[in-house]
Image: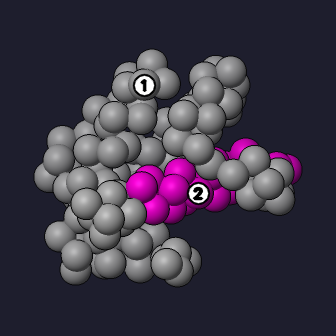
Amino acid sequence: MSLPTTFEDLVEEANQLGLYKSLVLQLNKDFLLANINLDFHDDVLPTSLKFLLHETIYKLIQEKFTDYLNLLYIVDVSEKQVKALNGEDTLKLSEDVMFLILQREWQKVWFRKKYS
């Protein structure tokens, strides 16, 4: 499996395979497990999803760093990938982390579909 390299590619692939709704549900599930109050409707537009997710990650980094780390653990984002990001600009960092989270959630959904 090769992971999409942009948000647009990820959404396009999810839509082509009919898995966009599953991706949103997986995000909701993992955010709930991390005790973060963010619940997307399953028909949320990709632009809204991206904006709200980015905003939430930014706020977590700024205000609730422990919750942010817990979310990364629950989603199972690679520590190596996060450490490789440039942390000087928090806004850019939160955008990059948001995409890593989406990539990992996409992997979960894709593998579940492929092997079920």
User: Magenta stretch?
Assistant: 87-108
Q: Residue at x 52, y 41 (%)?
A: 75
Q: Amino acid at mark 2?
A: Leu
Magenta-span inclusion, residue 106: yes
Q: How is the image coloured?
A: one colour
Q: Amino acid at mark 1?
A: Leu
Q: Residue at x 38, y 63 (%)?
A: 111
- Tell me the tag on residue 33: 1
Q: Name the spot of residue 63 as percent of width and height, x first.
A: 65, 22
- Graded by Cα atoms within 10 Å as few (under 14), some (14 to 19) or many (20 or more), the crowding at tag 1 reads few
Q: Residue at x 40, y 72 (%)?
A: 10
Residue 114 is drawn in which quadrant?
bottom left
Q: Name the spot of residue 65 as percent of width and height, x first.
A: 69, 25
Q: Looking at the image, which is closer to me, 4 or 60?
A: 4
**Which marked residue is nearer to the observer: mark 1 or mark 2?**
1
Residue named by callout 2: 100
Any part of residue 79 in sight: yes
Prevailing secondary structure of the magenta residues: helix
- Graded by Cα atoms within 10 Å as few (under 14), some (14 to 19) or many (20 or more), the crowding at tag 2 reads many
Magenta-span inclusion, residue 88: yes
Q: Determine whether, in the image, residue 33 is placed left or right of residue 28.
A: right
Q: Looking at the image, which is closer to me, 104 or 100?
A: 104
Q: Label 1, label 2: how many angstroms apart (C-alpha)?
A: 18 Å
- Disc 1 element: helix
